[in-house]
Image (tube, rainbow, N blue to C red):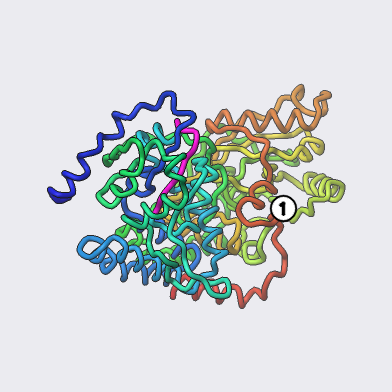
Amino acid sequence: MSTMTTSKCSVFPTVEKCSSTGREKHTVVAAMDGTLLRGRSSFPYFALIAFEVGGVLRLLFLLFAAPLAGFLYYFLSESAGIQVLIFVTFAGMKVSDIEWAGRAVLPKFYSSDVHPESWRVFSSCGKRCVLTANPRVMVEAFLKEFLEADMVLGTEIESYKGRATGFVRPPGVLVGKNEADALKKAFDFETNRPDVGLGDRLTDVPYMSLCKEGYMVAAKRDVKAVRIPKPVIFHDGRLACKPTPLVALLIVLWIPIGFVLACLRIFVGFLLPMHLLYYSSWALGVRIIVKGTPPPLVNKSNILFVCSHKTLLDPVFLSIALGRPITAVVYSLSRLSEIISPLKTVRLTRDRVRDGSKIKKLLQEGDLAICPEGTTCREPFLLRFSALFAELTDQLVPVAMVNQMSMFHGTTARGWKGMDPFYFYMNPSPAYEVTFLNKLSQELTCGSGKSSHEVANYIQRSIASTLCYECTSLTRKHKYQALAGNDGIVPVTEKPFLQRAANTISFVYF
């Protein structure tokens, strides 16, 4: 920052000197990047949208454009640099897809970057307004739903027939004087002048000067995550890491290598007998950690393994931990996943009578694995357990499943589920931890008079306690309505298999 910039910004005290008491009736105006968020660069969030909506090719174009955007940002104007990012990221995208990413993908990353001092002041005020140079369509859902902002003033993008053109509407990118003008239009300064203005750079000074008090926010690194009013329980998207320019470049370079590695890992799992997969998985970089004591192998034990649900590979890693294949019952499964599965998979219909009859029949044939949450949850929460399984047998063994993915998520709510195992195995060194809990004693089962809901809730609490997770009453419908706008049921014949496979392979490589 230049000497002139420093002198102008030094007119305002630091945010640490701002009191957060007695501000319930006050209005606060804050910038987003660098103020409400610790990071000043918005590139990672544009990169997330580029990859999740446009694919790896769009992310590659954004990487090529990043040096130009940075040059314009620092040597010409902040507005010009952001316009380049907006054009390369958004041009040709459906506005509805951008809105989806802003609602389902970005909040997870935004929430981990909230500035603690800015949030202390922002959350103490009764009315909250956010000014941002980012397109409003990509940030509004997070700011209003998770940070409880009352008003979001951001850059407005142009669209044509539902698709973004890549250009912005007048008055242009919301920085400097445009921020101040937008604030003047939003507030009646004669009767309702904002009380507190928060900013972090020279271009924030015009709107901060309009507020009764102004405070500058300094960069803050390596701090604990801020507890925001609403935790991010459900989120979508394939990327598990924040794509800074260097990380984004590594992702682009890794994808073709990772896809070949994933195919090898899947092929080996399909080819080798189950008792050898533990060692072959470690040899191929897939870490498997087994805790607790698996139940002994007994002929016709007819055990129902009740698992927490992290990915559709849960039954596979359960079988690897046991050293023998276990039949898995599933609610929704893509045709490709069914074809490449090394286990027998049986579809459920969500009809209690038919499903109950099917599960009873399968239990007579041998051990069985079920995930009563009905869908996956990435965060440390357990969804409500469907109680049907508890009515069908008293031979219940809870299993706590947890995994680690450094680059890609092996689950999706909106994308094609047939790629889930590929994305999991595309991680450089994914890990699965399988913890066997004690078999339920007879007095805790329905056979001793407990209701099926009591049994299901007890197992949910037991697994949550083992994993240090939080139990919820949320269900599959809550997740899919929040992330995809549907009920989460996968059609068996969405598209011809070969066509979908070809589309996916072309997406991964090109």
When asked about the image quadrant of residue 441, the answer is top right
- Which residue occupies the foreground of this view, 451 or 474? 474
Report the side of 331 relative to 380 (left or right).
Answer: right
For residue 445, side relative to residue 275 (left or right)? right
Q: Nearer the viewer, residue 59 or 300?
A: 59
Query: In this rendering, would 52 be left or right of 195?
Result: right
User: What residue appears at the point 50 percent right and 45 percent down from the top-left corner?
Assistant: 403
Residue 363 seen in render: yes
Vertical position of residue 413 compared to residue 213: above or below? below
- Does residue 188 sit above or below 293 in this rendering? below
Q: Residues within 10 Å of mark 1 (few under 14, many from 20)?
A: some
Q: Which residues are magenta?
A: 124-132
Q: Residue furthest top?
A: 443
Give 468 or 148, whichever is nearer the viewer. 148
Outermost residue toward the left? 3
Q: What residue does disc 1 label?
A: 331
Q: Could you say where residue 215 lies in the image, as x and y percent from the top left?
A: 30, 37
**What is the secondary structure assignment of the residue under circle 1?**
loop
Residue 501 position in % (x across, y down) = 58, 73
What residue is shown at x 46% (from left), y 46% (from top)? Answer: 187
Residue sitting at x 70%, y 30%: 457
Q: Is residue 151 magenta?
A: no
Give the dominant element type of the magenta stretch: helix, strand or loop: strand
Residue 243 visible from this viewpoint: no
Residue 298 horizontal/vertical position (percent): 70, 38
Image location of residue 343, percent across then percent down:
65, 56
Residue type highlighted by circle 1: Tyr
- 233 vs 420: above or below: above
User: Looking at the rendering, which quadrant does residue 77 occupy?
Assistant: bottom left
Give 189 or 496, whichever is nearer the viewer: 189
